[in-house]
Amino acid sequence: MSLVQGAHPQTSQPAKVRAALLAWPEFNKPAVWLVAVILLIMPFIANGFFLIEIFATTLILGTVALSLMFLAGYGGMVSLMQLTVAGFAAYMVAVFGMSANTNISLGWPWWLATPMALILATAFGTLGGALAVRTEGIYTIMITLAIGAAFYYFTNQNWPIFGGHTGINTIATPKFWGVDWRSDIPFYYVTLGVAAFCYFAVQYVSRAPFGLALQGVRDNPRRMAALGYNVNAHRVAAYAFAAFIAALGGVLQVWNYRQISPGSVSVGACIDILIIAVVGGITRPIGPFIGAFIFVILRTFALDLLVKLGLDGNRFRLLIGIGFLAIVFWSSDGVIGLWERWRRGAAAVDKRAGGGHGHG
Amino acid sequence: MTRFIERHPAWALILLIAVAVLLWLILAVWPPGLEEAIGRKRVFLNALFNGITLGSLYFLVASGFTLIFGLMRNVNLAHGSLYLFGGYIGYAISAWTGSWVLGFIIAFLGVALVGIVLQIAVFRRMEGQDLRQTMVTIGLSIVFADLMLWAFGGDFYQIQTPSWLVGPIELPLVTAVRSSGEAVYLRYPLVRLVILVAAIVIGIAMWLALNRTRVGMMVRAGVDDRDMLAATGVPIQLVFVAVFALGAGLAGIAGVVGGTFQSLSPGEDTRFLLASLVVVIVGGMGSIPGAALGAVIIGLAEQLGSVYIPTYAIVVTFLIMVLVLALRPQGLLARR
């Protein structure tokens, strides 16, 4: 593919379009366009509650889980600290920006505080990654979980910077060009824009030389090292990229809730991100968003549903846990895997039906 | 020991000096200048003893964790749940019968039974798939946590200390000298000292069982090379079940112990899971002496940290982990 392009630099316009379509197969399917249009006109369909509590929250959680999907799916590193990175970014927005806790917040304007938060959170995630890559495989989970849990306990007991267990409240959100970007419809478009950006960035990187090398490292690190690739550098770079995505999600999250407290970075929340990614499927970038949608729907409506079925409404986490176990037991690549298997099964049935007496 | 001194003379010297300074800090009467600089000796000694006893509790939890990991490569992230479950069983039994010892025994048996069921019904089906096993343990920890929240609610429980362990005793350590020349001795809760002794006894028993018995030999061989052990005809599945039961049971009795001198509530499972993780990362994964060393280090760091730098105490623990990962990624006492 790249060889052909290199041999004929003067390709015509339609050929370029075709090449782009080959590189981005999403654009070729009508279903994808349908989803994109629905997402774009969502504010005209859904009211404020659904728009923010369901769709914007899905997009934010999906973005954070996307960073885990990138690490786990392409790098083979299951990092449980992606939510911690996001929470760190959220805390940094609160610390550098404006909030009700004036003795903590530095009061910078949002266009200064947000890049600062992104840079610091990316650095934090990269450092954590550099620690985690010192060991391999299953140890990654342990170390990243330890980092996440340590950060949770640290925010709980640290008052001067992180505001202890009450956290930081009433954080200012951006207002410019005469738009309050936290009001429902603009905020929905902001989250949609960021989520789409992250999605396509992951999609692009996974096909770029770096992403391919990373997948090589995932499949056979020793061979890649023998070929002259710096295995650890690739892994740390993957952590840096994932940390940036998670940080974007974290900034959106703090703008959404306008407050941040240790509860948002608890170990349970870290594990929720893993659940979202695994339930959705960690083989494709779309998986985390599907997982996040299922998770948010369950979280929002499980209470009503359980009460309606005559059960205790507080057993939402039990439901999540059992669902997660079921997915891990029966489908290693999540809902996407189930869907694909079902389609393949349907196709096979079609073929068999067409082939007549082929089996028996 | 002598080999260590020969190979690392500088480290040995530093360690020797550190031990000497520590002994002096414990045994000597502090001069007034030192008391002014870092506070009363009583505070220091209390933090030190609390650190060591907390370390012994961490050892009980982490030794099971590291044993299971070492043999089966199973990172049991539901270990904290087993701890909390053991604590709740101990609470229920001791509140019902009034006997602490009975609660202790039933907690061990009950949680070991859960371990056996888990190993046979769940983990045996996915042997060799590390990541999937870990994911399953995560799912189980969520389910267990919610079931226990359902059954016991969000309240704090404390297991009644048996009457023969209540109250402080006087230790032959001088904390200060009164102006009259009379020495003040350290008073310390008896129950914590008993826990320390019990942890040491359990640790030594485990070491003996691993190094001096036939089953221990099988376990050690399994840690080194599981497949080869299976090929020699050892009923490895039985060994797995036994080790999982023992590891889970240890977490269970640790729950009873922790519920006696601390308290039980939702969230403690995460705390002790984190403690076991850090302890085995520091001490070396799969190593019992490593778990003991790591537990004491982390317990001391936590207690001394919370006395002397209260709002950054967890950072000390964390920095120790970072330092170990940077210098010796396999952990302090791991062989590889």
Image (spheres, rainbow, N blue to C red):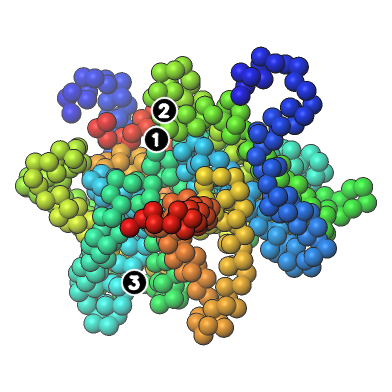
User: Residue under mark 2: which chain is it in?
Assistant: A
Amino acid at pointer 3: Tyr
Instruction: Kindly state the secondary structure of the residue where label 3 is placed.
Output: helix
Amino acid at pointer 1: Glu
> Would residue B266 be visible to someone looking at this image?
no
Q: Is residue A356 above or below residue B25?
A: below
The residue under the point 41% across, 45% down is A142
> Would residue B331 be visible to someone looking at this image?
yes
Which sits in the foreground, B298 or A81? A81
Task: Please check whether the numbered discs 3 and 2 fall on a single chain.
Answer: no
Considering only order in the chain, which callout, 2 or 1, is on the residue closer to the N terminus?
1
Q: Is residue B164 above or below residue B189?
A: below
Instruction: Kindly state the secondary structure of the residue where label 1 is placed.
Output: loop
Please give the count of numbered marks on the rendered protein: 3
Say the numbered circle drawn on residue B245: none
Decide: few, some or many residues near mark 3? Use Cα within 10 Å; few <14, some 14-19, many ≥20. many
- Which residue has dot 2 on it? A221
Return the x and y of residue B30 as percentages of the image width and height.
37, 42
Return the x and y of residue B280 as percentages of the image width and height.
33, 44
- Which residue has dot 3 on it? B88
User: Residue under mark 3: which chain is it in?
Assistant: B
The residue under the point 41% across, 72% down is B147
Q: Is residue A215 above or below residue B107?
A: above
Task: Please check whether the numbered discs 1 and 2 fall on a single chain.
Answer: yes
In the image, taking residue B247 as reference, residue A150 lies left or right, namely right
- Which residue has dot 1 on it? A136
Q: Decide: marks 1, 2 in contact (CB < 8 A)?
A: yes
Quadrant showing the C terminus of chain B? top left
Quadrant showing the N terminus of chain B? top left
User: Residue under mark 1: which chain is it in?
Assistant: A
Return the x and y of residue A177 as percentages of the image width and height.
92, 47
Q: Quote the CA–CA distance across marks 1 and 3.
A: 35 Å
